[in-house]
Image (tube, grey):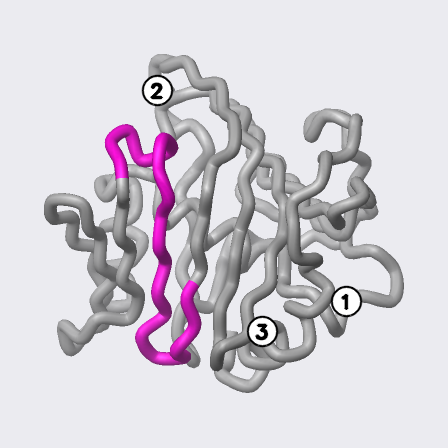
Amino acid sequence: MNKHSVLKAIIIGLPLWLSGCGLLSSETVSELETDTAVVANKVEVVAGKSVVLPQPFQYGANLTASQLITATWQEETHQLPVQLEVTPEKIVLAGFSSWGTRLFSLAYQDHRFDSYIMPGLAASLPQPEQVLFNIMLTLWPVEAWQPLLAVQGMSLVDTQGRRQLLDSNQQVVIDIQYRAVPHLDGEIIFKNMQLGYVISIKTLTYSQNNVEQGND
């Protein structure tokens, strides 16, 4: 994720994130087919530094959620409806247009991403794994992230109502604010301090039940 590619996703891609959250597709996330584009489970957080994402089971629960992601950059605001499904074995994420057309989807299982982007939109949409990283950074336990971030000299700090990703110089890279407890009950504000964009994550509906964590 270099600065040019991220800003391109915001400037070019966000107009496709249609304002207003219409009904999602009638397909459930688990039924979505993925046209295979397989990559390792790494995401670039800052220029030249990629981190491995935690495993699905480390969330500690089964989760199905419909969310509305709103991104703001230089006074432009656009929205993207997404659907998220988490089980101990797998995460599936899908982004839709307001009329229910699937724009992208991603399955995360067995330490790899299998992703799909609607033909012709690859240069105009954010990478699915980047969207997943943003969501996982807000929701997965700090303990699941710390050893993975430490490899790059980074750390994640939780305080009341706030979570911050710090670089090796203890500078804030990402600032996350929670408006409710449990976090899914309220708006989550995700600020990229280096690139200057803000993402709001609102969970419209969700179902969750805790599971025992395995040892993968």
Instruction: Answer whether residue 181 is magenta in the image.
Output: yes
Distance, label 1 to label 2, CA atoms, is: 35 Å
Asked if labels 1 and 3 touch by Cβ distance under 8 angstroms, the answer is no
Image quarter of residue 37? bottom right
Residue 151's disc number: none
Is 210 on the left or on the right of 26, as rendered?
left
Between the C-alphas of marks 3 and 1, the distance is 13 Å
Amino acid of disc 3: Ile
Which residue lies under the disc numbered 2? 213
Residue in the picture at 75% in, 49% down = 97
Residue under numbered circle 1: 122
Give the CA separation, mark 3 to mark 2.
36 Å
Q: Report the front residue among 82 and 167.
A: 82
Q: Which region is colored magenta?
A: 180-198
Q: Residues within 10 Å of mark 1 (few under 14, many from 20)?
A: some
* Label 1 or label 2, whichever comes before in sequence order: 1
Tell me, yes or no, whether the two marked residues, 3 and 2, touch with CB atoms within 8 Å.
Answer: no
Describe the element under mark 2 as helix, strand or loop.
loop
Which one is nearer the viewer's eye here, 152 or 121? 121
Residue 120 is a magenta residue: no
73 above or below 190?
below
Dot 2 alpha-carbon crowd within 10 angstroms: few under 14, some 14 to 19, many 20 or more: few
- The residue labelled by disc 3 is 10
Please state which amino acid type lies under the numbered disc 2: Gln
Which dot, 3 or 2, sits closer to the camera?
Answer: 3
* Closer to viewer: mark 3 or mark 1: 3
**In the picture, residue 197 is in which quadrant?**
bottom left
State the SS at label 3. helix
Residue situated in front as seen by the camera: 105 or 107: 105
Residue 11 in the image: x percent, y percent?
Answer: 62, 79
Decide which of tag 3 and tag 2 comes sooner along the chain.
3
